[in-house]
Amino acid sequence: MRRIFKRLIEEIEFSDWRPFFAWILFLVFSFFIENYLLKAFFMVAFTVIIAYSTYSTYRRNKYIKKMENFCKQITYINSLTEALRGSMKLEEVLTLILKNLIDGLNFDRALIYIVQQEHRPVVHYSAGYDKGGKFDYSYNVSLDKENSILARSIIEQQTYIITDAPNNFYCEQALVEKLNLKEFGLIPIVIKGRSVGVIFVDNYISKKKIDDDTIQALKVFANQSGIAIENAKIHETIESLATRDGLTNIYNHRYFQEALRKELEKSAKYNRPLSLIFIDIDNFKDYNDKNGHVEGDDLLKEITQLFRENIRDVDILARYGGEEFVIVLPETSRADAYQIAEKARKAVEGYTFKLAESQSQGRITVSMGVSAFPEDASSPETLIDIADKGLYKAKTIGKNRVCSYSQQ
């Protein structure tokens, strides 16, 4: 009772104390009323009036604060929308959304799960953020999983507030234990009737309840976030088309030139080695003439996959043009580049291609030229030229080998 009275006093502004002053004046005035029944009646009546006036003031102030908070949330969401319009990369968009869920809507933790539409739809973790900043957490779940609250929220496009996660049938225990879940909210991200993901929020530190007003603000937030996510995906697709080869889906000539320039600048700045491998498929024109361009395209894709499997993640594989490929090898000496090139060459030589018998040797092979910074060149153009000369040397002395122009 004491706490309630204290809260009531805190909610009442100074200007709202006037009824109390009137009550005190009445008490003083009541001393002059001799009839006790009349005095009691006026005292009770005045007390009821004061109580009602005080309660009305309390409710009014509470409503005003509630509306002010809601207006702040909407204003904040509008500001965020403007900021999201300036962000084109998906990772930047997700980080901005999550950071602002924490800083603007005052949640303790927020995550976004994105639906990947590939071979089968799955909910795939994209990003997480809490009071301590961005954190790493991975969680995948199939959308056909019946007892998954994430899947249900996305499929049904339904908002959920879970109040007792450990005992909820639809909450996967792996997720509950990993995040130590108690109460949390899920708000689907829907664009043009299609679910693209779901926002997860909770207050695992403050234990603050997620009320209806906050949910309404979150729904507006989710709609704006969905538009930003979709725009970022479109931007990434366009960017990919500009930097990827349409047939093999590896980097194209334009991207290679830019990547080589940047890597060479980095190597020069930090005094680190860099190597380049220039590759050509032996007798590819003959293969195309005998088997047709469709089979030739299939061969290019198969060889590309072999290259991918036999180089490192840091290496940059690109299609230079036609049947020619290049590989940029950061922080790699010429000797190490030779080993990587030999590994890739042997992988092609030993692979069983379905139309290999159409070739005079009965197999598909590649020739390679290697150049290195700083030994061979210090500019992108010269590095490419030396590697190309090494490739020509390999072709001249018998093909199916790795050569360096600068080493006899």
Image: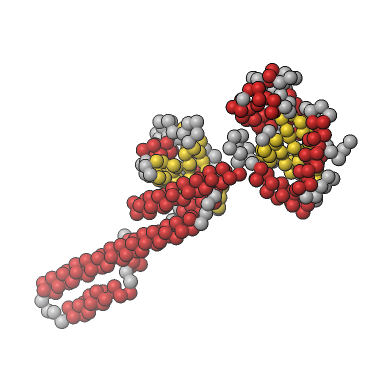
Residue 164 horizontal/vertical position (percent) = 40, 41
Quadrant location of the C terminus in the rendered image:
top right
Colour scheme: secondary structure
| Number of residue marks | 0
Determine whether 15 is above or below 348 in the image.
Answer: below
Q: Nearer the viewer, residue 53 or 145?
A: 145
Residue 18, quarter of the rendered image: bottom left
- Is residue 110 shown to the viewer in this render? no
- Is residue 391 shown to the viewer in this render? yes
Q: Nearer the viewer, residue 331 or 291?
A: 291
Q: Residue at x 23, y 68 (%)?
A: 53
Q: Nearer the viewer, residue 227 or 58?
A: 227
Q: Residue at x 35, y 52 (%)?
A: 216
Q: Residue at x 44, y 56 (%)?
A: 81
Residue 289, quarter of the rendered image: top right
Determine whether 393 is above or below 241 in the image.
Answer: above
Residue 332 horizontal/vertical position (percent) = 78, 41
Determine whether 325 is above or below 35 in the image.
Answer: above
Quadrant location of the N terminus in the rendered image:
bottom left
Residue 138 horizontal/vertical position (percent) = 54, 39
Q: Nearer the viewer, residue 9 or 2?
A: 9
Q: Residue at x 48, y 31 (%)?
A: 120
Determine whether 314 is above or below 33 in the image.
Answer: above
Residue 28 horizontal/vertical position (percent) = 21, 80
The outermost residue toward the front is: 289
Residue 118 is left or right of residue 274, and the answer is left
